[in-house]
Structures are given as structure tokens and as C-alpha cells.
Image: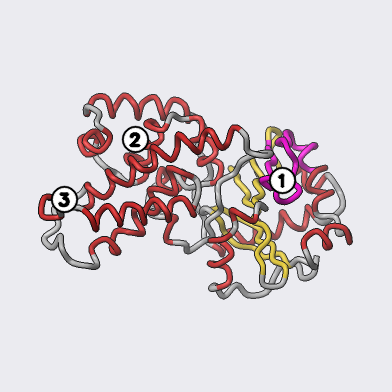
Amino acid sequence: MTTESPSQDEPELFENLRGRLEAIAYRLLGSAAEAEDAAQETFLRWEAADRAQIRVPEAWLTRVLTNLCLTQLTSARARREVYVGEWLPEPLLGGDPMLGPADTAEQRDSVSTAMLVLMERLTPTERAVYVLREAFAFSHAEIAEMLDLTEVGSQQVLHRARQHLAGERTRAAVDLAVARPVVEEFLAAATSGQLEPLVKLLTADVVGVGDGGGKVAARATAVLGATAVAKFLRGLFRPAEAKRAMLGGSPDVYAWTANGLPALVVVVGDRLVGVMTLEATADGITAVLSQVNPDKLGRAGRRWAATEHGEPLIRGW
């Protein structure tokens, strides 16, 4: 719920809201770089606006940002139709303020890698209503004003979005202490050279997806099923000189979190070269999602370089 600000002209007002705006934009776009751009464009429009006429700055800024993102989503869909291979969102490492609020299951789900992929099936308006309501608790009256809908219309759009996403809730976000043993067990199985330990960790309908964007070698299509994914992972984690040459050196593998879930971070020297996120339920790992497109690792790489991350689980893999 937005409230009227008593000090609309304070220079720091926009900066105080920038993190929240970027978190909204990231959920709408699935791109950290594009979210930063959308927030910056919103700032430029804020600077040019007659702020004396703006009664509730947060509502005004959110409306401008959301509509910029809706326009961006239309062009993004066209780009993704010709995207090379599978598309995954940019990963956000644990502690990144762009992750936004994580107090409720809906807030945590809305930023998970798998949910960001699932939200691609929504129309831009459905996605905007879902994010604003479920992740940021705007009222339907506020959303209706932002998106030029009626309040009843906003409720109907949310109902449709929920139907499209029904049954797709992911595991709740975890902290690093909880994520580490999950990653350790997965990595031990993946590097064992055997299928059985991996298959035991995976659900029957597990999916494996890699996004190289045509810049780095990655499977062009998803891998489906426990046995197929286990075979793929066994090959992926088998040390080979060709892999080291492709990466530009011997990688170190760390346990971390990305988008609120257990993740492996792969680093060569001071370069972050990949983030593998593990989506899971009580039944096992449901998705192994690997981002290796260098164009989508910029923010994660900067965050990693500025973070104290301890010793790797595997050094010089």
C-alpha cells in the first residue's frame, strides 16, 4: 500500500525507492540489465516531471516503471523468438537488493528462476498484475490506476494469471547455510561418475536447461527425465582438457544461492563463468538451470567480486 510522501522534493526520494523499482522491473523483465535501464529511464522522467503535481511519488514512479516494462516486454518477446537455444533469466546472487522482498511464499516464488521462466507464458498485463499484487502487495485499486484497468478488471487478470501458474509453486527461498549441504550432496553425486547417486536426487520429471545464448556451448533444447538429466550431468561434470580450454582455465566451484535457491557458482580466476540453480521440492530436485551466457552474468559477476565467498567446494575442477 502506497502512502503520500511528506517530502516529495527531497533529492534522495528516488534513490530511496530505486531498489524497490529495480526489484519490480527484474520480476517483469527477467533481466537485471534491463531492470537497471528501466529504473534509470524512470528517474529521467521523474527529473523532468512537475513534481508539485505528483501527490504520491511511489505510485507515480511505479506506474511509469511498469508501463516502460510493458513496452519492453513486447519487444523482448520478439527477441526471444529468435534467441539461440533455451532462454533463462539473469541470475541474482544471494544478498542482491534486486531480489526484493522475501517475507511471503509468493514473494519468494516470484523471483525464483523457474517462476521467471513460467511467467513468460503470461501476457504482459497478466505478468504486471501478478507481480504488483503477489510480490509487492499493491491493492487492486492501485494496480487498476497504474495499468488503466478497472478494479474488477485487475482482479480478473490476476485470476487468469494464477490459473496459468497453478501448481507451479517452487521451493521456498533458503539461506546459504541451508543451501550448502544441498549443493554439496548434488556435487558429490554429479562428480561420482555414476548415474545412480544422481538419479536418486532427481524427481522423475526433472528438467535440465542451459542458456548459452549462442555465445557459449550449451544444449539447444531442454533435457527431460531423471535418467536423461543424470547422464547429461555426469558428462558435464567429467573433467576434460577441452572444457578447461573452452573456459579459459581450471574452474573453481562454490556453493551459494541464486534467486533464493541453492546454486553452484563456477569461477575461473576472477571471472564468474556460470551459475547453476537447483529448484527442488520435498521429492527431490525438479530443475537444474544453468546460466552460462556471458551477457547475462555481468551483475552476478560484479556482486561475486565484491563478496567474501570463502573456499570453493572444488578447486581446479
- When the figure is inspected, residue 161 is found, relative to residue 19, above or below; the finding is above
**Nearer to us: label 3 or label 1:** 3
Is the Cβ of the residue at disc 3 closer than 8 Å to that at disc 2? no
9 or 153, nearer to the observer: 9
Q: In terms of secondary structure, where does tag 3 sit?
A: loop
Q: Position of residue 253 (x, y in %)?
A: 71, 64
For image coordinates 28% across by 34% down, the residue present is: 147
Q: Position of residue 65 (x, y in %)?
A: 33, 47
Residue 229 magenta-drawn?
A: yes
- Residue 7, located in which quarter of the rendered image? bottom left
Give left or right: position of 290 versus 5: right
For image coordinates 61% across by 54% down, the residue present is: 295
Give left or right: position of 181 versus 40: right
Q: Say the numbered circle drawn on residue 129.
A: 2
Q: Say the numbered circle drawn on residue 56.
A: 3
Is the Cβ of the residue at disc 1 closer than 8 Å to that at disc 2? no
Q: State the residue position of label 1.
A: 201
Q: In terms of secondary structure, where does tag 2 sit?
A: helix
Query: Which sits earlier in the primary sequence, circle 3 or circle 2?
Result: 3
- When the figure is inspected, residue 314 is found, relative to residue 214, above or below; the finding is below
- Residue 27, located in which quarter of the rendered image? top left
**Nearer to us: label 1 or label 2:** 2
Q: Amino acid at mark 1?
A: Leu
Q: Amino acid at mark 3?
A: Val
Q: Position of residue 231 (x, y in %)?
A: 82, 42
Quadrant of the frame with the C terminus: bottom right
Alpha carbon distance from label 3 to label 2: 19 Å
- Residue 131, located in which quarter of the rendered image? top left
For image coordinates 82% across by 49% down, the residue present is: 234
